[in-house]
Image (spheres, coloured by chain):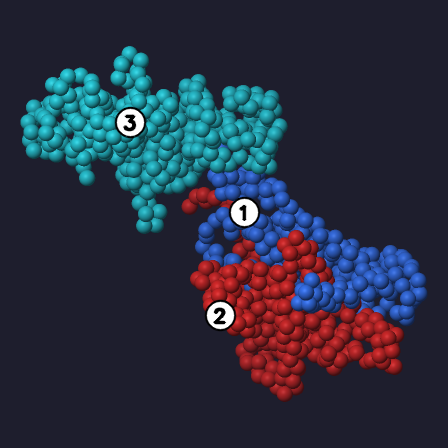
Chain colours: A cyan, B red, C blue
């Protein structure tokens, strides 16, 4: 990969007695779409503010294109921010808002006009140049905020939950537009959100954060399919967690006892015999067999359960299933016209079913609380 | 040391300089002048003495002082008695009318005190408005000699200073949380108790502010005493003015002025304490 | 409406009446066609005409207007910057500064007049235009600070961060973003300062000299000699000017943008 455009080394920050960031290390590549994902208070917005220059770290280093940001105030950094509240200047027109940055750099007259209109065209607001922010809808204001930031051709664009005030459909449309914009401009985007679906759909890489630490940093696929701890597994999408114990070890394969069955699974972690483990399975990876399916011998290898709840979601049916051994599992079933059993998905509450999953689609983690 | 924020330095520097040069320094000079001796041809001679303060308590001047305190005090009390109910009633008026009603109080507040005092002269003159009305109504047979009396001075000061009492009272009464009164009622308190133990303590900062804006000017407004009281009534303000302009006894005048300043600081401190108590620890 | 309601309204009207009666009488008699008596003898503009025919008076009025305009402008400049600084920054001595401004506003006029007089005399400054100007600026500043500060507290902090983010220095941010949005309050502050300056008697009394006469002091000396219709007219004009300025200031402060 290319040289990191942004580097955070051992960055810590505290407000009064509250530690917001603990020894955070992060490297962002040029031209990538990176999302900081996490619950409120995890420190993701703080990282953004540190990069923009509105706050200073208590310890550690921040480098942008190799340059130490320690003494550089926000107005001198080649970084621009799209604020959550848009922060458009109410007394200036759309044109003047977008022209604000270029004007400060000395652009005037025709050159300025061209630059500004180009930016407005990119967000499809060229007809609104003469309006004031108060006359625009939320979605339009948001696009002005983006234009105002990108017109300065920053090395890095910081976006602080920019879509959170928009309604669902508009949000989905903007996600696509932002992604396309980023591809076209080639600017590094750092996007903050608490919505994991948004993070997965837009990003090249995702940093999942919790309580001031980065829990996992990887591609959306890695985050979702190979979570490195329970927090990430639970925060990103739904997860089922089954308790197992290692009975035989031949790394990377292990014999794991789950209730009365022993299954041979693989894991990148090293376990010893007797270790307790978490078996994590995504709801869509669970397979449900109905009572009348398959032979008795086949069913003997499965885990018996009863359906507790049926939730119809239009494109899928979610089931809450309780294993005979007591655990409550969540599963998502897709309508499948090739499979007789799955063609209708007309499960009933109380129905007896059998549960299994495709081996090696699960993740095995060391046991955590 | 590189100056990181030149703008901040300039802004703070300007106001800091101005305040120190034209607010802090002059007042310090007054205090210093008050302990110096009166100079023969210069204004002051550089010798320390507490003579001026001693002379303030001379029977001659003490009389003026006490008189002035009485006049200003009476005015303040009257302003409070008239203004408190007025401000309270204002807060009970429908919200639609309040901006207009408030504006009608703000206008006299900003109008020249001299003009308003003069208007009082026209009213109280021997052939003035009040006498004309009373004569016309047949309530009196001869015009009343109202001018150049103490009541005239009090009337003039009351007239001029009433808005200064009303506005701070209104500000604090408006912020009063009605729910506290309801809670007290709910617990069985009568109206007098509610006033004494809830409304009064919570509005105390406003009362003190109003008194500050009424009592202190009341001691100093020499033109009111001039126009309405004549030579017979002297305020501390007249005393100070005479010392500086006619008698040229600057240390003495400065001593009287320092006394006023001391009073002001005392009242400010009382205001600060009361507003801290009233807002339960929040900043005044 | 019940008795209590009626009594309340009556009290309000009484006090309002008390506040406005003398000035209304004053205004009415400024049009009274009678030089000495206060009996109504018809309407006339004669007294106003006399005022405008008096060149001395016009000069004095001009002087006052000049001082008011200059002191309001300088005080608004210093006061607005002070308000912005108090809102934006933390600095050494900030609580002291805030207290000083508050104390300055509360100081009785006579104390301020004396103090400034002593200052000017110790600096051997001749009493006249310049000492008057300095004094007026001084007592105007706190009012501007308070007026602007009360407006500033509703300011969106993110706007300042956005300006910085786009490359503006502190000065550019204040000039292009903060000040334009504060303009109504700044203008109101200017108007209030102008009014205070035009009406000031006591501070001016001590710090001005014979070379530069101003209106309030002129009125004072005229009034000491007795009531005349010309004074009525003059006072009515001053009332009118004050009223106009205060109305505009209130409109500016309460407009919804």
| Mark 1 surroundings within 10 Å by alpha-carbon count, few (fewer than 14), some (14 through 19), many (20 or more) | few
On the rendered image, what quadrant is the C terminus of chain C found in? top right
Residue A25 as seen in the image, left or right of residue C222: left
**In the figure, C89 relative to B35: above or below?**
above
Where is mark 2, residue-wise? Answer: B188
Q: Residue at x 78, y 56 (%)?
A: C240
**As drawn, is C75 to the left or to the right of A360?**
right
Q: Which residue is mark 3?
A: A348
**Dot 1: what SS?**
loop
Nearest to viewer (mark 3 / mark 2): 3
Which of these two is toward me, B205 or B33? Answer: B205
Q: Position of residue B161 (x, y in %)?
A: 67, 68
Per the rendering, the mark at residue C154 is 1
* Residue depicted at 19% across the width and 31% down the height: A323
Q: CA distance from mark 2 to mark 1?
A: 40 Å
Quote the CA–CA distance across marks 3 and 1.
58 Å
At x 59% / y 45%, what residue is drawn? C182
């Amino acid at each position: 990969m290319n040289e990191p455009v942004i580097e955070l080394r051992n960055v810590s920050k505290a407000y009064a007695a509250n530690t917001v960031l603990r020894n955070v290390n992060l490297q962002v590549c040029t031209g990538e779409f990176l999302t900081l994902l996490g619950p409120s208070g995890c420190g993701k917005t703080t990282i953004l503010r540190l990069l923009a220059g509105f706050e200073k770290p208590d310890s550690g280093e921040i480098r942008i294109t190799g340059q130490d940001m320690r003494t550089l105030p926000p107005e001198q950094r080649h970084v621009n921010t799209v604020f959550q509240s848009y922060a458009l200047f109410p007394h200036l027109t759309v044109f003047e808002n977008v022209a604000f940055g270029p004007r400060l750099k000395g652009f005037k007259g025709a050159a300025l006009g061209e630059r500004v209109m180009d930016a407005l065209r990119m967000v499809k607001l060229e007809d609104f140049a003469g309006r004031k922010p108060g006359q625009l809808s939320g979605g339009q204001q948001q696009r002005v905020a983006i234009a105002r930031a990108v017109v300065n051709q920053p090395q890095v664009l910081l976006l602080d939950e920019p879509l959170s005030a928009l309604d669902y459909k508009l949000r989905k449309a903007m996600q696509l537009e932002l992604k396309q914009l980023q591809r076209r401009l080639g600017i590094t985007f750092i996007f903050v959100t608490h919505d994991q679906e948004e993070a997965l759909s837009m990003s090249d890489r995702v940093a999942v954060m919790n309580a001031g630490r980065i829990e996992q940093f990887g591609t959306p696929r890695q985050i979702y399919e190979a979570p490195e701890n329970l927090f990430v597994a639970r925060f990103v999408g739904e997860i089922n967690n089954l308790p197992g114990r290692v009975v035989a070890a031949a790394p990377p394969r292990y014999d794991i006892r789950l209730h009365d069955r022993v299954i041979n699974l693989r894991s990148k972690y090293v376990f010893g015999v007797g270790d307790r483990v978490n078996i994590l399975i995504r709801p869509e990876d669970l397979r449900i067999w109905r009572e009348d399916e398959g032979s008795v011998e086949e069913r003997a290898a499965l885990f018996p359960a009863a359906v507790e709840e049926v939730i119809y979601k239009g494109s899928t049916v979610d089931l809450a299933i309780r294993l005979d051994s007591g655990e409550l599992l969540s599963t998502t079933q897709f309508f499948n016209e090739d499979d007789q059993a799955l063609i209708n998905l007309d499960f009933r509450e109380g129905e007896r079913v059998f549960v299994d999953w495709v081996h090696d689609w699960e993740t095995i983690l060391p046991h955590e609380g | 040391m590189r100056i990181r924020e030149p703008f901040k330095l300039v802004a703070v520097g300007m106001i800091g300089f101005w305040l120190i040069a034209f607010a802090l320094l002059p007042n310090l000079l007054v205090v210093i002048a008050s302990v110096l001796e009166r100079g023969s041809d210069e204004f002051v001679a550089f010798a320390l003495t507490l003579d001026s303060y001693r002379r303030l308590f001379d029977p001659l001047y003490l009389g003026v002082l006490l008189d002035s305190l009485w006049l200003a005090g009476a005015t303040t009390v009257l302003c409070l008695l008239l203004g408190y109910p007025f401000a309270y009633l204002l807060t009970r008026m429908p919200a639609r009318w309040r901006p207009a009603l408030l504006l009608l109080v703000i206008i006299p507040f900003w109008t020249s005190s001299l003009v308003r005092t003069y208007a009082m002269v026209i009213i109280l003159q021997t052939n003035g408005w009040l006498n004309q009305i009373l004569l016309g109504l047949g309530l009196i047979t001869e015009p009343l000699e109202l001018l150049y009396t103490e009541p005239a001075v009090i009337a003039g000061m009351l007239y001029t200073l009433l808005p200064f009492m009303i506005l701070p009272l209104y500000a604090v009464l408006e912020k009063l949380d009605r729910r506290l009164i309801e809670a007290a009622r709910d617990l069985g308190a009568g109206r007098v108790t509610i006033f004494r133990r809830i409304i009064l303590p919570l509005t105390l900062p406003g009362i003190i502010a109003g008194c500050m804006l009424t009592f202190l000017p009341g001691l100093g407004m020499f033109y009111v005493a001039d126009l309405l009281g004549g030579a017979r009534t002297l305020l501390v303000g007249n005393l100070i003015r005479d010392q500086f302009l006619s008698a040229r006894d600057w240390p003495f005048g400065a001593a009287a002025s320092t006394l006023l300043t001391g009073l002001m600081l005392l009242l400010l401190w009382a205001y600060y304490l009361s507003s801290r108590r009233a807002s339960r620890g929040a900043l005044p | 409406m019940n008795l209590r309601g009626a009594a309340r309204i009556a009290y309000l009207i009484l006090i309002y009446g008390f506040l406005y009666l003398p000035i209304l009488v004053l205004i009415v008699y400024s049009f009274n066609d009678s030089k000495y008596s206060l009996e109504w003898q018809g309407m006339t503009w004669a007294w106003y005409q006399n005022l405008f025919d008096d060149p001395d008076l016009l000069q004095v009025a001009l002087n006052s207007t000049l001082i008011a305009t200059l002191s309001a402008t300088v005080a608004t400049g210093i006061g607005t910057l002070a308000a912005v600084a108090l809102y934006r920054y933390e600095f050494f001595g900030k609580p002291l500064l805030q207290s000083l401004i508050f104390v300055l506003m509360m100081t009785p006029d006579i104390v301020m007049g004396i103090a400034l007089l002593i200052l000017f005399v110790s600096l051997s400054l001749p009493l006249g235009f310049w000492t008057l100007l300095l004094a007026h600026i001084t007592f105007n500043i706190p009012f501007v600070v308070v007026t602007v500060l009360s407006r500033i507290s509703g300011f969106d902090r993110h706007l300042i961060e956005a300006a910085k983010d786009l490359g503006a220095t502190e000065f550019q941010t204040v000039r292009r973003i903060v000040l334009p949005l504060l303009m109504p309050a700044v203008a109101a502050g200017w108007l209030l300062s102008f009014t205070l300056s035009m009406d000031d008697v006591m501070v001016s009394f001590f710090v001005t000299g014979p070379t530069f006469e101003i209106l309030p002091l002129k009125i004072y000396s005229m009034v000491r000699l007795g009531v005349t219709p010309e004074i009525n007219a003059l006072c009515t004009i001053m009332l009118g000017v004050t009223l106009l300025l205060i109305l505009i200031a209130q409109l500016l402060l309460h407009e919804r943008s």
